[in-house]
Image (cartoon, rainbow, N blue to C red):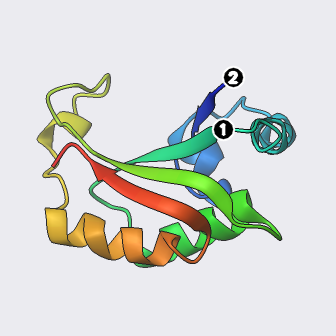
Amino acid sequence: MFYAAMDIKCRRDDYLKIVNKNINLENIDKSIELVKRFPDYEFRTTVLPFFKENDFEEIGKWIAGYKKIKLYSLQQFNPKRTFDPEYGKMIPKTRQELEAFAEIMKNYSENVRVLGC
C-alpha cells in the first residue's frame, strides 16, 4: 500500500519568510492536493516556539479545505537539531501547549497526534 507524508512548515502566509523566499507557494498547494489523493496519508508540522493558536487555525484551513484530512501530527521542536543557531537558543513548547494545538487541529483532521514530548 502507498503512504504519503508531507511537512507543513508553517501557515501559508508565513512560508516565504520562514522557509525560503524563492519557494513557489502554488507548488506547495498542488503538493497538498496530490498528497490528499493517496488512500493513506499524513501532514505534520514541527511546532516552533513562536507558533500560536491562530497559526494552527490557518494551517488547518489551508490543508483541509472542504474535507477533513486523514492524519495530522504535531512534532515537538528540538533546539539541538537546527540549521540556524538562533533556533538553537529557543525553548520548545510544553506538552500542554502542543495538546492545545492538537485540539484545534481536530477541527480539520480525522486523527491528530502529538510526537516527541
Question: Does residue 29 appear in the picture of this structure?
Answer: yes
Q: Quadrant of residue 4?
A: top right
User: x, y (%) of residue 52?
Assistant: 38, 72
**From mark 1 to mark 2, how far is it between C-alphas?**
7 Å
Q: Amino acid at mark 2?
A: Phe
The outermost residue toward the front is: 1
Sequence-first tag of 1 and 2: 2
Q: What label does residue 81 carry, if any? A: none
User: x, y (%) of residue 5?
Assistant: 59, 32
Q: Is residue 65 left or right of residue 44?
A: right
Q: Residues within 10 Å of mark 1 (few under 14, many from 20)?
A: some
Q: Is residue 101 left or right of residue 63?
A: left
Question: Does residue 52 appear in the picture of this structure?
Answer: no
Q: Residues within 10 Å of mark 2 (few under 14, many from 20)?
A: few
Q: Residue at x 70, y 57 (%)?
A: 63
Q: Marks 2 and 1: in contact by CB < 8 Å?
A: yes
User: x, y (%) of residue 73?
Assistant: 43, 50
Q: Is residue 28 left or right of residue 8?
A: right
Q: Amino acid at mark 1?
A: Asp
Q: Give the residue at mark 1.
A: 40
Q: Residue at x 14, y 28 (%)?
A: 80
Quarter containing the N terminus: top right
Q: Total label count?
A: 2
What is the secondary structure assignment of the residue under circle 1? loop
Nearer to us in this view, 75 or 19:
75
Q: Residue at x 60, y 62 (%)?
A: 59
Q: Residue at x 26, y 56 (%)?
A: 49
Q: Give the residue at mark 2.
A: 2
What is the secondary structure assignment of the residue under circle 2? loop
Nearer to us in this view, 12 or 30:
30
User: x, y (%) of residue 25?
Assistant: 79, 42
